[in-house]
Amino acid sequence: MPPEVIATVADFCDLQSVLNLRLTSSELGEHAENVLDADRRAMLRHFVTDAEILWEHFENYGAVVGGLAALSFVLRDASMLPDSLDVFVTMDQAEFLEQMLDEDPDLDLRLTGTVDRGPSQDFITPRHTSRVATFLCPNGRLLKLCTLSTQSVLDPIVVAPTTALMNWVSPHAFGCAYPTLTLKRRALSGSISAYAPGVAALYLVLKTHGFERMRSPWCWPEYAALVPPSKRTWFKPCLSALFLCPQQGRFFGDEGSLINVFDLQSTNHDELRTLHQPPYGVSVGWRLWFGGQRGCDGHCKVRDPLLPEGVVTVAAVMVTRRIQFRATFVDPRADV
Ligand SMILES: [Zn+2]
């Protein structure tokens, strides 16, 4: 097949196919990178005229995009782009980024309100946030800048109400916590009430876009079929080999996650590490926090090699492909 035909086909491939294509040849690899870069720009052009300016600000202050916009990116499905863009920034950078977004005339954003976290906040508002500043975009859509109560911009992503939203896009890289599920439009949602504010609407969006949503990974029998059956009657077989066990300690960079950079050729990983840009800098280790999960017959709950029992997230510093842990700082205003 001629390269130009393959290149055209790549435009309609899923993310994993595009990532595979970039490894085949320099010519197709370049086209694959252009496809990814176009997706990255298109995501922000849904909100502002000049996506690069907004990406520059996010780079300068270490912010990442999450929520439905990041899901839209990993699924390469522009129809899922929401009317509101979730942006996460740590508290030490938030004030500067908020001011920059408010004052940059090229972006033409208008700050319409700020909400400091209170007891009435709904489930859909990203957890682990202490403040949300809402900006009105020129096209009428919204940008929600979420100031975090932890040190990692990836922390609120892994405590999203469903695995479908556990994705992020930064100026240089992107990540998906559960690609085995998400890229197949499958999602775990635990036992959060569908009647909680905001959650019903989110579940409806996922259903509309073909997502199958379950409370546990054992609801899909093909995953359990890939591991030895449990010898203990009351336990489920451990799915940690598939990185799908709910109690399993996980981090962006393990074999069950998908992380990748936009530009393989010129992205300098040492520089990203020095600048603390995701996936480097302060990252996060996590296990699924939502309740209702059955225990496995493995070591995920009490003897997980990554997380102690009961710990849901912990700030972690990525060093090459290994990970080191530091204590998580949680702002006293945060109640989760
Ligand atoms: Zn397990």
Image (cartoon, grey):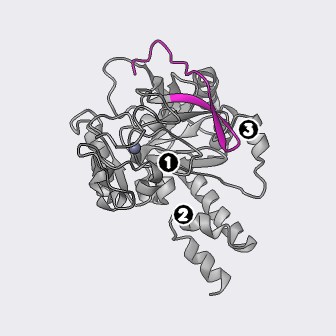
Q: What is the quadrant of the N terminus in the image? A: bottom right
Residue 319 disc label: none
For the point 58% across and 28% down, the residue is: 102
Q: Earlier in the sequence, mark 3 or mark 1?
A: 1
Q: Classify the position of ligand 1 by quadrant: top left, top right, bottom left or bottom right.
A: top left
Q: Earlier in the sequence, mark 2 or mark 1?
A: 2
Find out if the beta carbon at label 2 lies less than 8 Å from the nearest ligand 1 atom.
Answer: no
Magenta segment range? 314-336
Residue projecting furthest to the top: 332
The residue singled out by tag 1 in the image is 70
Give percent across and percent down for residue 284. Answer: 55, 34
What amino acid does circle 2 point to?
Gln
What amino acid does circle 3 point to?
Arg
Q: Earlier in the sequence, mark 3 or mark 2?
A: 2
Q: Specify whether residue 319 is painted magenta.
A: yes
The residue singled out by tag 3 in the image is 273
